[in-house]
Image (cartoon, rainbow, N blue to C red):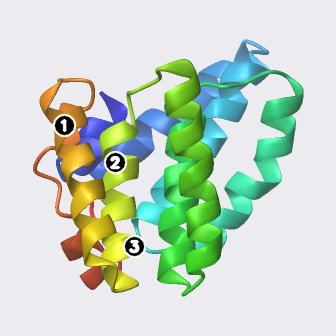
Amino acid sequence: ALLPAAFAGSAERADAEIIEGIEVADRQGAMFWSLVGRMLQGVMLIFRGEFADGAALINALAPKAEAVGIQINFLLYRAALAMAAIAQNRPDQAKEHLNWAVYRIAKTGEGKWAALIWKIYEYLENELQNPLNSKKAGSIASSYARRGRSVIWENYNISAAFENSISVI
């Protein structure tokens, strides 16, 4: 419910849920979930247009998450980092994050964030003036969204998000 709430325009609710989750995890000594929550805070920062802060938080926490075997939402974290890189005019870095995510989707079949990842790829390729690649990425994004694996992204307008300083929430 957290991220759908954020993308439906309830950023305050999403932030409150993240903070509450972190507080509960900290009280119970559940560092795994506390770390997941803190990484989601980085995602929310990026989606609000606070690219440097969000990317710095995710990048600082990612090695800790990997060290303890956290794999939950890593595609989302990479998608957010790609968005931050695009916004900061670092297309090569964005492609690194997206390529990692696409490889992971192909390797594991993990599709929860696939439509978002391909929508970002579509946007990036369009910005790089690669219309064929952009169209292909858009088609793949739509396919994932229609399969119901990530329906929230079917009508998500990534272009508008970037045009509005990525303020999607």
> Where residue 116 is drawn, which disc sits there?
2
Q: Residues within 10 Å of mark 1 (few under 14, many from 20)?
A: some
Q: Which amino acid does label 2 sit on?
A: Leu
Give the structural element (helix, strand or loop) at label 2. helix
The image position of residue 120, as x and y in percent, is: 37, 61
Measured in 3D between alpha carbons, the distance from the residue under mark 1 to the one under mark 2, in whole angstroms, is 11 Å
**Res. 29 in view:** yes
In the displayed structure, 115 sits above or below 156; it is above
In the displayed structure, 25 sits above or below 134; it is above
| Quadrant where the N terminus is found in the figure | top left
Which of the two marks, 2 or 3, is nearer to us in this view?
Answer: 3
The image position of residue 130, as x and y in percent, is: 34, 79
Seen from the viewer's position, the closer of residues 88 and 20 is: 88
Q: Residues within 10 Å of mark 2 (few under 14, many from 20)?
A: many
In the displayed structure, 94 sits above or below 127; it is above
Q: Which amino acid does label 3 sit on?
A: Leu
> Where residue 143 is drawn, which disc sits there?
1
Measured in 3D between alpha carbons, the distance from the residue under mark 1 to the one under mark 3, in whole angstroms, is 18 Å
> Where residue 124 is drawn, which disc sits there?
3
Q: Earlier in the sequence, mark 2 or mark 3?
A: 2
| Residue at figure coordinates x 44%, y 74% from the top left | 49
Total numbered labels: 3
| Quadrant where the C terminus is found in the figure | bottom left
**Res. 73 in view:** no
